[in-house]
Amino acid sequence: MRAQIAVYVVLTALALIAPFLGLYPVFLMKLLCFAMFACAFNLLLGYTKMLSFGHAAYFGASAYVTGWLTTVHGWGTLEGILGGVAVSMLLGLVIGAIAVRRQGIYFAMITLALAQVVYFICLQAQFTGGENGLQGIPRGSLLGLIGLGNDRIMYYFVLAVFIGVFIFIRRIVHSPFGQVLKAIRANEPRAISLGYKVDRYKLTAFVLSASLAGLAGSLKALVLGFATLSDVSQTTSGEVILMTLLGGSGTFLGPVVGANVVVTLQEYLSDLVGAWVSVIIGAIFVVCVMIFRRGFVGEIERRFARRA
Amino acid sequence: MTTVFGVPLPAILGQLMLGLVNGSFYALLSLGLAVIFGLLGVVNFAHGAFYMLGAFAAYVGLQMLGINYWWALLLAPLAVGLLGVIIERLFLRHLYQVEPVYGLLLTFGIALIAEGIMRSLFGASGKSYPVPALLQGGFNLGFMVLPIYRAWVVLASVTVCAATWFLIERTRLGAMLRAATENARLVQAFGINVPLMVMCTYGAGVALAALAGVLAAPVIQVSPLMGSSLVIVVFAVVVIGGMGSIVGAIVSGLVLGLIEGLTKVVYPEASNIVVFIIMAVVLIWRPAGLFGKEQ
């Protein structure tokens, strides 16, 4: 426990001074957004073992809605974010209600197929800008007081939201609700026989995860100033799975580590190797599934647990 | 001119024809997926990638080695099937003991690798493959012109589907396969080499996908991304038909192709998503799919 607190303190301190270490703030914010996305995804995969193959739908839809509300309708930043999150929550409710009826791979295929519906709607609808996406999304200001145009101020805003989400997820997992989720993960028929309305718990977890993924998408749209089809695409859904697996699903820090590794790899490799980057990502996927199913953080935790 | 819903009849028949052609591809692909899922319990995400590799094998064969369409129809599925056998041997085999989602994730990674390699080698743009001389032109049916190649695609895929169904449901080999699907251990105890059967089944399922790719090459643009969105539609088709059901996969593949074609006439905006919406409705009404058995 003490080691864990030390790790968190060091990481927070690093995050606080990161913009002064010569790291590009927009890149750091992108890392934070994807880390938040992966943490939201992990709430589902790690703690209930539901593999959603369509999480980009919530991430991307929320990015589009936030972008549309702030550019076309002139909404403020916070209202725009809330609007995006509300839409992804609603999407999560509808898709989740259908998907939780089935388990395992069926669940994965259904979430994938329904996310594809969201993708096609984004492709064809007027407000998303079709193939071009939405561009020039303004960052605006916090309640009209603090302008977010400055990269460093925006960074600390995103960092604050990220830490908030991280603590929130920890809270959920350690709550009685989270314990029931873990019980369902361990043995679903038993949880049913104990009288828990399993589907309702799963749906709640799904909606929570979708909403937080939406929050990450909204922030990403504001940070980069655009929302595109790739945000809602199957590739993004796959990448968030990879981030979570690589870092270690079912651990708090795993998704954060995984997101940092994957986003950094993509950032630096895409200039170097072009289309081969998807070969490399695919190869990491294969290695992860074959011999590294616990992920970085999962392996480290296991070493520590053995010694203790 | 005769019209239905204010749309000229030839336009409707034309779209239905296109729908039937797409449905033939859905049927071939979902059949392979269903066979693989039935025996291996693996949802083969790489199915779209193997379909793409089949089309590319035909394209490269013609451009570089001068292999014509008819030989490609035989050789491309063999080559891709062999690749499938190797993948089963090296990777999938080690995942049967862990949860089935890992098979899905592994094949997703393999699809990414295959698509990335083809994109690096051939670029993202589509390549055209000529219609073989024997199948060029069309029949004039009086009210519409039926392109011979499209008729051939439907005929060929229905024949292959029927043959596969016969092989699985009516032969000794098929009986062993079905028995192994029910209880692999028991079948192995009878002295049947189950791991070999599993390996060949994966290869055969993958070869079916490659065959669909060769058949598709002359009617669509051959491109590295041709399989990645198709595979999701095929997943939906398999879920509608009922996972692991052979008849369900074939019938729902053809029917959904037709429905998609009709939607293009009536309400084109929805044609991309109609299959997924039907899937959602079927799942609410019959969670095991139309032809599936409730566990």
Image (spheres, rainbow, N blue to C red):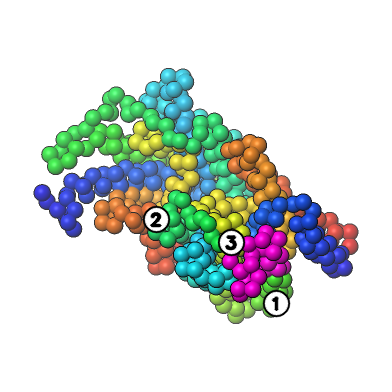
Q: Tell me which label, 1 or 2, sits earlier in the chain.
A: 2
What is the residue that sits farthest to the bottom in this orientation?
A: A195
Q: Amino acid at mark 2?
A: Gln
Q: Is residue B15 above or below residue A202?
A: above
User: What crowding class fits label 2: few (fewer than 14 Cα within 10 Å), some (14-19), or many (20 or more)?
Assistant: some
Secondary structure under the numbered disc 1 in the rendered image: loop
Residues beneath discs 2 and 3 located on the same chain? yes
| Residue B221 location, quadrant | top left
Where is residue A80 shown, x and y percent of the image? 54, 69
Q: Is residue B15 above or below residue A13?
A: above
Where is residue B214 shown, x and y percent of the image? 41, 33
Could you tell me how far apart the alpha carbons at marks 1 and 3 are, in whole angstroms? 32 Å
Circle 3 marks a residue in which chain?
Answer: A
Are the residues at dot 1 and dot 3 in contact (C-beta closer than 8 Å)?
A: no
Q: Is residue A187 magenta?
A: no
Q: Which residue is mark 2?
A: A124
Circle 2 marks a residue in which chain?
Answer: A
Q: Which residues are magenta?
A: A139-163
Report the mark closest to the observer, 1 or 2.
Answer: 2
Residue at 47% of width from left, 20% of height from top? B64
Q: Between residue B286 and residue A88, name the one nearer to us.
A: A88
Q: Which residue is mark 1?
A: A175
Q: Which residue is mark 3?
A: A222
For the C terminus of chain A, the image quarter is bottom right
Where is residue A276 shown, x and y percent of the image? 61, 37
Q: Between residue A291 and residue B41, name the one nearer to us.
A: A291
Circle 1 marks a residue in which chain?
Answer: A
